[in-house]
Amino acid sequence: MRDVIVIGAGGCGPVVAKELAAHGLDVLLLEGGPRHANPRQEWSLLENDASHLLNGYLRAGPQDRSKPAWYRELPQNSFLWQVAGVGGTTQHYFGNCPRAYPGVFSGYAGADRGNYDVGHLFPFGYSDLVPYYEWVEATLPVSTAPMGTKETVYFRGCETLGIPVQTTKTTKGPSYRPQENAILPPGGHAGLTTDRSKLVFPLSTGCTFCGHCIQGCMQPISVPRNLTARRSTDNSYVPMGLTANAWSPQGKAVTLVTDSMVTKIHTGLVDGRLSATGVTWRDNGTGEQHREDARVVVLAGGAVESPRLWLNSGLPNPNDWVGRGFTDHYLDLVCGVFDDEVGNSKGPHSSARCDFPGYGALQNVGIGPAIQALAMTSSDSGIRGQYTNGRGLTGNWDGATGRLAATELKDVLLHGVDRILNVVTLTDDDVRPDNRITLSAMPADENGPVPKVRMDQRGRSTRSVRNREFLARKAVDLLRGAGAKKVYRMDLAPLMMHVHSTMRMGVSETNSVLDANAESRAVKRLFVADNSALPNSIGGPNPTLTSQALATRTAEKIFRNYFGGDPWVTTGAPVVSTDQRITRRMAELGL
Amino acid sequence: MTEAEPNRRAFLTRMGLFGVLAGAAVAVPVAAHAGSSGGTVPSLVLDLVRPALNTVSRQTYNALTVFAVPGQDEYSTRQGTPRSEPGAIEARATDFMLHALDNFVPFPDELARPIAGTLAAGLGGVPITLSGGLLGLDLSAVDSLGGAVDALLANDEVLPLSMVVALLLNSLALRVNPLSATGVLQSPFARLTYAEKAKAFSLLEGGDSTLVGAADSDVPEPLRETVSGLSGYVGGSLLTFSAFSTYSEWAVFSTGTRSVTGVPVGWRISDHDPGVLDGWDDLRGYYQNRKAVAA
Ligand SMILES: Cc1cc2nc3c(=O)[nH]c(=O)nc-3n(C[C@H](O)[C@H](O)[C@H](O)COP(=O)(O)OP(=O)(O)OC[C@H]3O[C@@H](n4cnc5c(N)ncnc54)[C@H](O)[C@@H]3O)c2cc1C
Ligand code: SF4
């Protein structure tokens, strides 16, 4: 019998695992994908080898790349971008760590309070989460991003928008700023050289501006795992969990089992109430089934797999909200074409942003040619100049929205991928019951019925549409202000890379799965601690920091309510994940 | 008359193909074709059918991928967008698509068979070349795209997803331009102009109710609406995957060394310089020299 079993070692599961292990609990962390123990031997940093949705080394699937990826039925034109393995989707992520807008929390009294998804607020106030934000920011750690060429161009555009620079962690109004991100700042030669002999740790420390965040961060060369530049959880929280006994006086190292998919959450009566009692998982390599029991089970499989596992386990779903309320920031992409190099494929992918509380956010996104081509051929507006699919929006951008294809696409790319600056809209989109995860009628895989991910792009709320239109126009103004000669707006089909709120916590019992402690209302001792626990789309900011702060809070609730312990966040001091005790212990363990 | 025939007639009607195919534009024995399906075919004949269908399929994907990235090849010329630089064909995008679709996307037979059967009904008027006349076999039942597919289905062959998608694109091609049923190359889709291909995509992406409705109604519950969803998904992803593969390193990637053996076509087109992969000298300092912010 374990104290706690955590399902999923992605962006958030390891946060709960590390926090509870630091306080001496016996934690088993189960992950369905691989652990990339030796990125230098496993990764190429090339776009297809890394990011091919079906067989890339960063994909949602088992360790053995010759086996199919996990199938998800997408009953619409769309992409779902998630990664399995230790680190989960943070193996792809850009490390951006903005806080949620205060307006998405209960008790917000700002003049613009009517401007948010008011029917689906956090069941507590912003100030309640602030200590947890600070704790995670210190742990990862989060710092202010430096600029590359593309950020200098982006800021040139921002300076024409008539909004101030934000110089605080909390967003208080429309503003622009460098990202606060979970990337160690460049030190030594990093960012200043292309000489590989100098890109070696410790001659270089932190971000080397390699330009491959999506393909996985393993910089600088020869760096110890927990000092790797980008703080995806495989480099931060997981090393902390595995070495908890080395840096926390009462710590007990987390047990990590990878390439093992949980297929069922077991329940029984504990203290007279229906409660989670353990899990069954399946070793992807051997097919063997294992079962372990625990006092508490934490579900953190991500916004698609968490509801899938719930439904496959036959757990109660009294108000039918498991899987509902899926939000994805209703992404759109605006691409500016410049006469000069803007460094699209260099440096961290996104180090600059704008915030428009009540509407959402903008950020730059730097990418290589394959993902650039993919993004420019994705649209809900048909093909430019040929057909509009009932849309073909016009505005301050050039021509109508739509995919570029053939000659037009080629001519844009012939001009040079490094002369494109992309701005993406992160829309404050509303929780809608019909955007949801269900079980597909397609054949089950070895882990049970597969998920069906429905996002009705044409059925977005009036507010979501208003927000996206507002943001797209701001993005165009920004790009023109920065000097773009031509600006394309894509009107993307759902590009689901920020996936949240499918097991939402909420104020009301009628439309939420979790209570204010992130514990399931229907099954006690079962907590959800990933993006799916978010009550809404947090206003548009990138979600992971908020989910990690919430997961930290959830760990405290678990510790207090089921293990009789005291909370630690307001009284304690966090250990930073780059601490040398972690480095040393990881080396001793050969990890 | 086979049991499937009313469905097929309904399908053809809804596709807008019945009139076209039964009329004078192309001589197609619709009823005869439908009647001829269902029987087993000698395995020698199947041995002729398979490579012929594969040729149709490959040509369809060649025509698809140049729709995303045209180059110096005959498919690009045929669609009316010849280019002086290399494109999807030189980047072997067809192989990429076939590999991805057939090895990594699960496609249950319960879906493949009815969809392929439905589509085959509309493809009876598309002649294909079988190199087997000398053997003295009667090939009249299988010398059309529809007949060939029917023969495979009747013999319980599993149709890969790539083949079904190719049939779909060719069905749409006939709908957009009935004259594409015959001509050079083996695939109607490959005979279309750029604008006609775009039209085919507009039908596919718009969840064209005629086409999708027909296919959906031939699929058993609970998979029914799966076909309409799949069609939207396929309509979206065929173009994006074609573009992604061409502009990626795929065609010149060596799994042994985990690196490229030459400069990928897409990097040449887009002037992409990956540098040393481990770092760039692109640090431009801190905005307003601020390295930290307040709470
Ligand atoms: C290209 C890209 C860039 C991004 N950039 C940012 C950014 O800059 N900032 C930001 O905040 N967010 C960013 N995101 C989003 C970010 O990656 C996610 O918010 C975050 O990873 C979500 O964490 P999670 O724990 O909810 O899910 P995941 O990280 O997806 O982790 C879930 C894990 O659970 C495992 N799992 C699932 N089911 C089971 C099971 N049954 N048994 C065992 N294991 C299971 C999965 O394999 C996976 O490893 C980005 C995403 C993408 C795709
Ligand atoms: S750009 Fe920086 S953070 Fe991104 S992968 Fe390279 S070194 Fe890591």
Image (cartoon, coloured by chain):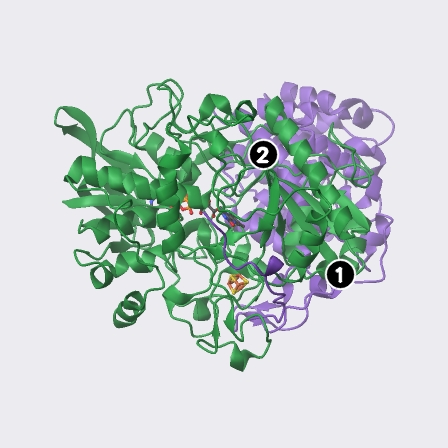
Chain colours: A green, B purple
Mark 1: few/some/many CA within 10 Å (<14, 14-19, 20+): many
Q: Secondary structure at mark 1?
A: loop
Q: What is the quadrant of residue A584 in the picture?
A: bottom left
Mark 2: few/some/many CA within 10 Å (<14, 14-19, 20+): some
x%, y% of residue A217?
Answer: 48, 62
Using the image, tell me which numbered label, if any, was put on residue A330.
none
Q: Is residue A233 left or right of residue A354?
A: left
Residue under numbered circle 1: A416
Residue at 62% in and 22% down: A462
Amino acid identity at mark 2: Leu
Asked whether mark 1 lies closer than 8 Å to ligand 2, one says no
The span from disc 2 to disc 1 (Cα, nearest Å) is 34 Å
Q: Closest to the observer: A278 or A588?
A: A588
x%, y% of residue A55?
Answer: 50, 54
Mark 2 on the same chain as mark 1: no
Residue under numbered circle 2: B230
Q: Closest to the observer: A107 or B78?
A: A107
Residue at 26% in and 50% down: A572
